[in-house]
Image (cartoon, rainbow, N blue to C red):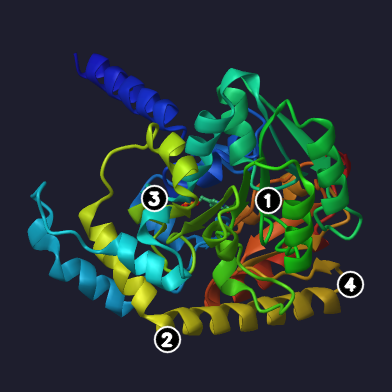
Amino acid sequence: MKERNAVSRRKFVGGLAAALGYVSTGPDLDVFAQGRAAGQGRPAAAGAARAPQTEAQYDALAKLANNENNFGIPDSVMKAMTDHWKYAGRYGYPGAGVQQAIAEYDGVKAENVMLSHGSGEILSIIGTALLQGGKKVLGVDPTYASVYSHASNIKSEAIRVPLTKDYRQPIDQLIELANKHKNELGFVYICNPNNPTGVIVKKQEIKKLLDSIPAGMPVLIDEAYHHYVNDPDYATSMPYVAEGRPVVVARTFSKIAGMAALRIGYAVAPTDLLQKMRVYQGGAINVLAQYGAVAALKDKAAMAEVKAKTIALREKTAKDLKALGYEVIPSEANFFMVGLRREVQPVIAAFREEGVLVGRPFPPMTQHLRVSVGTPEEMDRFMVAFKKVMSAPVTTSQQG
Ligand code: PLP
């Protein structure tokens, strides 16, 4: 009986996840379902055999695999959530005002904002809404492949273009393909800055793309790591929504705001696109997450502090790795990629043995390791582990 309940609960959760199009719902799931997130339809082997079982085991790991904010939830966000526990048992609580707060923060109208359970939900919803009838999504490889996985889940396809030699998204090629395949495409996906490289698409390139693809073709611009960028050639694409272009900008509170497990994100888009997307929206957003999100948007000082600490640690670690003779791709996000000159999969497993979780493989960049920027202690542990792992002899299976 117990087993049957467990099985049916598993089935229920699985069915719900499939219905919502989730690739992952928690930190350990995300790490150990890495292959799935990369759109390969199977879990990655690295570390999979040793998923953390207890809180103590999980807490002991250096968590540099999921681009979270390892400095933790800002005090102001904690306070806002704690102050509103009284509504946790209610349906009809007063609105937290999160849609309005987002609209003010991003300079758009509240009617252009749609909340979601993390921005991952937006990436799935837009797929379901715009790829109906066998339409395809166009984007680069590698990128955050959740849109591609979702497309394949709903029996749709993706046209995936490799990055340039210097790890940029080939905008001219995307324009050419968008025009060539205009009748087949449901939307174009751009992750800016791109995950896993941390490389931006310049504002001039975004404008060129939007001006040069067929009129009316929707473009999903995933700005999950927007808050970390310093490059003056980067700009958010929010103003294009205000201009009335068919642009959907996805944002999340999972990264700089430190709220990954609270599951709140949003899309900013023209109302006609939002109308198509709302049909597939999940239920209400957790009330505490809503109050937390409002506080996160208001606490610009906390965001600036996390940004500054993260960038300083990213640059220090990159310098240390370069001093050891490794190539580091210049990043504008809270993660970076280091070129290993050997296959990454066994290296990820070796890091796991050292208690350090690092990013999944991102084919076709199978000799690059993605490292999220953690706390100073975690980055120290990373460097110690890096020296040990990389100085160990390469086994035949590692040479691939
Ligand atoms: N977009 C990008 C580029 C990401 O890297 C992630 C998560 O790592 C997401 C979207 C989804 O994040 P969440 O659903 O937690 O907002």
Residue at the disc numbered 4: 325
| Label pair 2/3, CB-CB below 8 angstroms | no
Residue at 67%, 40% in the rendered image: 217
Residue drawn at 18 percent across, 59 percent down: 95
Residue 118 seen: yes
- The answer for how far apart the CA atoms under marks 1 and 3 are is 19 Å
Q: Which mark is residue 301?
A: 2
Q: Of the residues tagged 3 and 4, which is closer to the observer?
A: 3
CA neighbours of label 2 inside 10 A, class few (<14), some (14 to 19), many (20+): few
Residue at 59%, 54% in the rendered image: 222
Hey, what amino acid is under mark 2?
Ala
* Amino acid at the residue labelled 3: Met
Which residue position holds label 1? Answer: 190
Rounded to the nearest angstrom, the CA distance separating label 3 from label 4 is 46 Å
Viewer-side label of 1, 2: 1
Q: Nearer the viewer, mark 4 or mark 2?
A: 2
Secondary structure beneath label 4: loop
- Mark toward the start of the polypeptide (1 vs 3): 3
Q: Element under label 1? A: strand
Q: Quadrant of the N terminus?
A: top left
Instruction: Report crowding for label 4: few under 14, some 14 to 19, many 20 or more residues within 10 A (C-alpha).
Output: few
Q: CA distance from mark 1 to mark 4?
A: 31 Å
Q: Is residue 16 left or right of residue 65?
A: left
Q: Judge left or right: residue 400 versus residue 159.
A: right
Of the two numbered discs 2 and 3 on the same chain, state the one appearing first in sequence.
3
Q: Residue 77 at what x, y percent from top left?
A: 29, 72
Which mark lies nearer to you, 1 or 4? 1
